[in-house]
Structure formats: C-alpha cells, structure tokens
C-alpha cells in the first residue's frame, strides 16, 4: 500500500493530519477508507491549502462551526469594519462566553444556554452594564451567524428578568466623578507630574477631548494664531479616522490650554522625542518607558489603560481621591457651564452636530460665539501643592 504524507489509518478509516497554524496540528477523519488513500491525500492537500490561505478550521474542513470557531471569524470581520469595541468584545467572549458555550455548535445553543452565561456573569457581582455588554456581544455574534446561514435561530431572547435592570454598579458615584477646580489646576501645574501628562490632562479637561481624541490628535490639527482663540480640530479617535459620534468638531483653545500647548511644542516635545515635531506627529505621543514592565512603544499612541494607570499614580502622589480618565471631560464641561457657557452652544464644541457640514455650521454660527463659551473659564496655572521634582512613571 502506497503511503501518502499526512494520511494515516485508524481501524478501517483514513485520517488526515492538518497544520492549523504554525506549531499547532489537528487530526481529522476523512470519508475515505483503506484502499482510497489517493482520494484522502487529495482531500488533505486541498484542505491544507485553504488553511494556509487563512480560512478558519471549520470553514476549511467543512466541520459544523462552534461558537468559538465562528467567534474568531466574527471578531476578524468586526476588526475589518473598524468596530471600536472589538478588543473589549474579544475579552468578553474569552472571559465569559467561551468557557460555557465555546465548544457547542451554533445550532445547539438554546436560550437556556445563553441565560446560563448571563447568570454566571451576574453571580460575579459585576456592574449591570458589564452584564449587558456581555449579552450584547453574544447577540451580535448569533445575528451575524444567522446572516451567514450558519444557524436558523436567535437564542438571545432574554428580558430584563434575566439581565437585570440597567443602573450604576455603585450608587451615587456619578456625583463625585469630577475634579474640583483646584484639583484640576494641580494636575496641569504640578512639576512632579511629567509635562506630557500635564498636557494630556489639559487636553482632556480644558479641551474636553475624549481619551482617544487626545491620543490621536496631531499637530496639524492644532491651529494657533486665530482670533479670538486658537482652534483644535477634532477629527479622529486614536487612528480610526473618525470620532466616537462620527462628527467633526472645532474646540476653541482656552488661553491656559493654548499656552501649555505652545510651551510643549516649542521645547517639551523635542526634549522628550529627540527632534522637533512635524505636522503629522502626535501631540502627546507615548514617552520613554521608565519601568521594567511590558514595553510600550516610545513615540507611539497612548492606550486608555496606560493613561489610567499613570493618572492613578499622579493622583496618589498629590494625595487626591482616585477617579477615571473620562472624568476630565466631565469636569471641563461642568466648569465651562459653571462659568457661564450656554449649554446648546457649548455642545457644538464638545459633541459636534452629526449630519451637518462642519464648515457651513461654524461659519453660520460664528467662531467668536463658540469662543465666548470657552474664554470666561477661570483657571490658573502656577505654584502647586507639590514641589517634588520626582516623576511618577
């Protein structure tokens, strides 16, 4: 009997050995029996070619897709579509869904199985919104599976009885989810905080930028020399080419923020990065790592997780209560309104107006009117509560 590479006998049936990915192999039975080695070898060759071309194992072999195998295709498609939550979706699937549903074929999953996943998530005492986020990604996965013709039913039919009510995990936390004026002044002034982080905190608060918008901001979008105030053009979150709401907006630069950005551009940026900034450079790229932990990319784009860790260290060094990075934006909007900004006009600066042409909108409304919402903010930089020269990393 002639032997064929990757084909072997088990009992009276022929099996094939397949390379799923480098270093990972799987054995799979064929429909052929002893004496049909040539046909089995041809099937193995075609299947291996599909795997080498990047097809998922179940797609390449014709095996019924499982929740986990289709999940890989689902996440790949979401990344190609630029879905912003894809990394969080992957984490939710791996942490909460795959351990329960992963090995099951898509057609096998019933509403009771999904209810079991949600019951296990709720038993961990996670925030109600986390429960909803896990359920949402499972529902999206099965919706895409239905569209692809891989399952005939949608098992995600749970109600609020199984999901629980939507509410904050900790009651009353929102009232304290802001910085006081004095705390903000310390965070953008204290010499113990590295200059790049002070600028980042000012962009997020006085500039009302979301973390991704601040991390993805480039010097070409910071316009000095306009009257009555300079302008930050908010075009993208991180490098995704779009903002969270899909709306471009113009944010007037408060004099304190304008001074900080000018100082950073003229000296601080070059001192950190070893060269003068170019128009396409990030305004607040990642500084040089100073610890022995996982490496971050020097000069690369900041992640929200890294910025949150640094904020915690800075708040601890100042002896302040811990808060989230997003609380900078809430603080900025709160302070602007306290100092006289009109809610609906300020909203054009902080949220934009989806569906409208930005040039037509701001020309007709008046740049000076938008600046008038920002300019009255009372904020000071200068001597701070800490004079330490150490730089928390």
Image (cartoon, grey):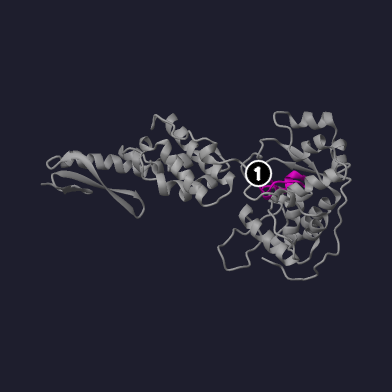
Q: Position of residue 122 (x, y in %)?
A: 52, 47
Which residue, given by chain and number where applicable, does mark 1 sit on? Answer: 237
Q: Position of residue 357 (x, y in %)?
A: 73, 29
- Say if the magenta span includes residue 215: yes
Q: Position of residue 294 (x, y in %)?
A: 55, 63
Which residue corresponds to the image point at 86% horizontal and 50% vertical from the top-left? 255
Is residue 338 found left or right of 166 in the rendered image? right
Which residue corresponds to the image point at 82% horizontal and 35% vertical from the top-left? 345
Is residue 120 found left or right of 251 in the rendered image? left
Q: Residue placed farthest to the left in the image?
A: 1
Dot 1: few (<14), some (14–19), or many (≥20) neighbours within 10 Å?
many
Say if 130 sits above or below 152 in the image: below
Say if 137 sits above or below 205 in the image: above
Point out the stretch of residues depicted in magenta.
Answer: 207-223
Say if 82 sits above or below 9 in the image: above
Which residue corresponds to the image point at 88% horizontal and 40% vertical from the top-left? 372
Dot 1: element? loop
Q: Quadrant of the C terminus?
A: bottom right
């Amino acid at each position: 009997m002639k032997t064929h590479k990757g084909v072997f006998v088990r009992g009276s049936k022929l099996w094939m050995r397949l390379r799923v990915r480098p270093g990972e192999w799987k054995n799979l039975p064929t429909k052929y029996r002893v004496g049909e080695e040539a046909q089995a070898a041809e099937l193995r060759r075609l299947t291996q070619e599909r795997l080498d071309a990047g097809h998922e194992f179940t797609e390449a072999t014709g095996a019924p897709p499982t929740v986990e195998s289709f999940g890989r295709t689902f996440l790949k498609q979401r990344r190609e579509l630029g879905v912003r939550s894809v990394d969080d979706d992957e984490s939710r699937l791996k942490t909460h869904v795959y351990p329960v549903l992963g090995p099951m074929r898509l057609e096998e999953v019933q509403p009771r199985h999904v209810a079991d996943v949600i019951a296990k998530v709720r038993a961990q005492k996670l925030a109600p919104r986390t429960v909803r986020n896990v359920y949402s990604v499972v529902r999206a996965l099965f919706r895409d599976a239905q569209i692809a013709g891989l399952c005939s039913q949608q098992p995600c039919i749970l109600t609020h009885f199984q999901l629980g009510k939507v509410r904050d995990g900790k009651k009353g936390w929102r009232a304290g989810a802001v910085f006081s004026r004095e705390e903000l002044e310390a965070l953008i002034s204290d010499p113990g905080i590295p200059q790049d982080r002070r600028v980042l905190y000012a962009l997020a608060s006085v500039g009302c930028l979301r973390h991704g918008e601040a991390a993805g901001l480039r010097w070409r979008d910071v316009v000095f020399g306009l009257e009555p105030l300079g302008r930050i053009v908010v075009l993208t979150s991180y490098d995704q080419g779009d903002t969270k709401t899909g709306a471009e907006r113009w944010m007037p630069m408060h004099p304190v923020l304008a001074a900080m950005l000018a100082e950073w551009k003229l000296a601080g940026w070059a001192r950190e990065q070893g060269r003068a900034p170019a128009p396409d450079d990030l305004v607040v790229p990642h500084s040089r790592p100073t610890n022995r932990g996982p490496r971050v990319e020097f000069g690369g784009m900041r992640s929200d997780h890294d910025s949150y860790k640094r904020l915690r260290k800075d708040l601890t060094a100042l002896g302040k209560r811990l808060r989230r990075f997003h609380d900078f934006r809430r603080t900025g909007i709160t302070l602007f309104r306290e100092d006289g900004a009109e809610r609906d006009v300020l909203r054009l600066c902080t949220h934009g107006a989806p569906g409208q042409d930005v040039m037509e909108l701001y020309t007709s409304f008046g740049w000076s009117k938008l600046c008038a919402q920002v300019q009255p903010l009372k904020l000071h930089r200068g001597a701070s509560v800490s004079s330490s020269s150490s730089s928390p990393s």
